[in-house]
Image (spheres, rainbow, N blue to C red):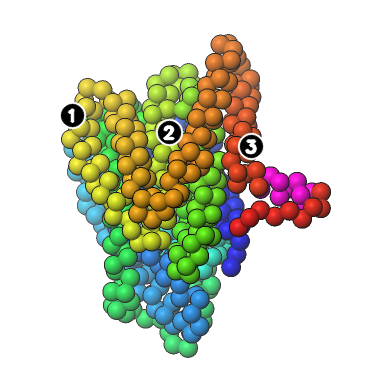
């Protein structure tokens, strides 16, 4: 079994490449396309999230089933049949997505979006291309799940990273050297999506074990995974609705240029979720294995280790983005206007995304135990409460009011669900999670960054601003290395290897 640290590192590298390129290219997109066209990219992100709900938990279920079947001799035929069956469903849904968006494009362009500079034809064409991109990307999630289950995460992230370079770098080149056109942007993304899915499809089938009989569609294979898929589908469906609800409401209440600033803040905040998802993808199958094997002691230790790693990966960046959001935006975009109009959105959205990210390790544990109803119920309650409140507040308080509601929800959701989850699954571990794994790290990291922000001179060049931001992040990271037991073990391991001491941390 590959080392968990290798899988996490590969996932972080793949996602890090995607996030890094997105952060680097977004300011150029804004400059070349304008804020209003960038607002369309925000609409595209919302549509992606909505249609990703059609996944219905199948990719995560396939991940688990492939990992389970890989340990059973002679299961090659079952693995290939499972993938062929679910693959047929995915491609059928992909075609439906393209057709639905194409049919609704004109209505959305005319009656939903509020545009000043973009004509209806441009909006309609962009929406059709958005649907094509989403449809072409959709089967990729299945093949990604297959490769996760086969623990081919290093190779998978080579594909993901290469596609990110082609998607972001290529789109920037096209906009700069050919034409700064939003329709050209989406056309390029459609081509990259098709290539990524094709390569991942070929590699996933290559990695599946060979079988004596050809793979075929079997309805019974869907029935076997249906129950678990429904549980994951509920979490994914309602969770994605929570994440996108603010954008859906504001896209109707704000003009596209105003929504563009909010979408820009959403890009930054989503990085917290993306980073946490890399850890989730690595630990979920490992939690499931330990639960099935009855390794309760190892499971508890791994739970705390990964919770502390999540704090280390997320909290330093979160504190810098929250406390120094204006400085980060000014350095990133080079525009004082964008920084002034976006910094508060960034602070509020990043705080909410951070709480959601920290919850991903406990969520993986719940799914491993097949006891995720508490999380699902909390999310459903959030949808019921947040939807009317957002619709009521958005016309008067705009993005600030809506993002404040999102933050309040995540605070309540985390506190309630974490308490209930620990009481049911790991009652003796709740205090350690709240204090050692997350509570103390949050307190010390945010306190340090607040002090750095307070000490920062009022007048600084962009270069010195960047240096000050880096010092805040580095100081917070080093502080967590000292504070968190898991990080101290890894640090001693590194020193021990350098010194030839042969030290290794506890499992």
| For residue 282, above or below residue 484 | below
Point out the tag, 1 or 3, that comes first from the N-terminus.
Answer: 1
* Residue designated by label 3: 482
| For residue 419, above or below residue 117 | below
Q: Residue at x 50, y 75 (%)?
A: 70
Give the mark toward the camera: 1 or 3: 3
Side (left or right) of 371 relative to 194: left
Side (left or right) of 334 relative to 345: right
Mark 2 to mark 3: distance in Å? 25 Å
Q: Crowding at label 2, few (<14), some or many (≥20) Cα neighbours within 10 Å? A: many
Q: Residue 159: percent from the left, percent from the top? A: 55, 58
Q: Residue at x 40, y 23 (%)?
A: 344
Quarter of the image containing the C terminus?
bottom right
Secondary structure character of the magenta stretch overall: helix
Mark 1 touching mark 2, by CB under 8 A?
A: no
Which portion, as a residue range, is magenta? 490-498
* Residue designated by label 2: 350
| For residue 20, above or below residue 400 | below
Q: Residue 487: percent from the left, percent from the top? A: 62, 44
Mark 1 to mark 3: distance in Å? 46 Å
Q: Residue 443: percent from the left, percent from the top? A: 50, 30
Whether residue 141 is visible to the viewer of this picture, yes or no, is yes
Point out the tag, 1 or 2, that comes first from the N-terminus.
Answer: 2
Toward the viewer: 438 or 188?
438
* Residue designated by label 1: 392
Give the mark toward the camera: 2 or 3: 3
């Amino acid at each position: 079994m590959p080392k968990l640290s290798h899988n996490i590192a590969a996932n972080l590298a793949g996602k890090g490449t995607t996030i890094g390129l997105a952060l680097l290219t977004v300011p150029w997109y804004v400059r070349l396309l304008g804020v209003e066209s960038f607002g369309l990219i925000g609409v595209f992100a919302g549509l992606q999230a909505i249609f990703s709900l059609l996944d219905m938990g199948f990719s995560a279920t396939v991940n688990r089933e492939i990992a389970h079947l890989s340990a059973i001799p002679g299961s090659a035929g079952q693995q290939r049949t499972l993938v062929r069956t679910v693959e047929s469903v995915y491609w059928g849904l992909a075609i439906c997505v393209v057709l639905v968006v194409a049919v609704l494009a004109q209505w959305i362009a005319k009656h939903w979006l509020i545009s000043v500079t973009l004509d209806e034809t441009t909006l309609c064409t962009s929406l059709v291309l958005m649907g094509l991109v989403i449809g072409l990307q959709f089967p990729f999630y299945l093949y990604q799940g297959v490769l996760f289950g086969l623990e081919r995460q290093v190779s998978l992230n080579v594909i993901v990273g290469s596609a990110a370079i082609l998607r972001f770098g290529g789109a920037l080149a096209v906009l700069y050297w050919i034409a700064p056109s939003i329709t050209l942007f989406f056309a390029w993304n459609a081509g990259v999506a098709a290539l990524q899915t094709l390569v991942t499809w070929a590699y996933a089938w290559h990695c599946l074990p060979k079988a004596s009989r050809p793979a075929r569609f079997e309805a019974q294979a869907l029935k076997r995974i249906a129950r678990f898929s429904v549980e994951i589908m509920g979490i994914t469906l309602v969770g994605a609705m929570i994440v996108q609800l603010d954008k859906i409401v504001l896209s109707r209440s704000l003009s596209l240029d105003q929504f563009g600033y909010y979408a820009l803040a959403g890009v930054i905040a989503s990085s917290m979720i993306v980073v946490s998802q890399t850890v989730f993808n690595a630990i979920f199958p490992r939690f499931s294995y330990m639960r099935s094997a009855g390794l309760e002691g190892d499971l508890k230790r791994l739970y705390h280790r990964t919770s502390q790693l999540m704090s280390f990966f997320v909290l330093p960046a979160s504190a810098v983005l929250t406390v120094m959001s204006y400085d980060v935006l000014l350095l990133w975009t080079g525009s004082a206007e964008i920084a002034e109009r976006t910094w508060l959105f960034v602070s509020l959205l990043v705080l909410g995304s951070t709480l959601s990210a920290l919850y991903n390790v406990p969520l993986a544990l719940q799914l491993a135990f097949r006891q995720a109803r508490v999380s699902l119920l909390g999310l459903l309650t959030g949808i019921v409460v947040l939807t009317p409140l957002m619709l009521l507040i958005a016309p008067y308080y705009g993005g600030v009011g809506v993002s404040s509601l999102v933050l309040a929800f995540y605070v309540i959701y985390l506190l309630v669900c974490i308490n209930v989850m620990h009481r049911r699954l790991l009652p003796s571990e709740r205090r350690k999670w709240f204090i050692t794994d997350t509570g103390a790290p949050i307190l010390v990291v945010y306190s340090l960054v607040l002090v750095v922000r307070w000490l920062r001179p009022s007048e600084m060049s962009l270069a010195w601003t960047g240096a000050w931001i880096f010092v805040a992040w580095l100081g917070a990271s080093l502080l967590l290395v000292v504070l968190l037991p898991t990080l101290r073990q890894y640090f001693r391991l590194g020193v021990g290897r350098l010194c030839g001491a042969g030290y290794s941390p506890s499992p």
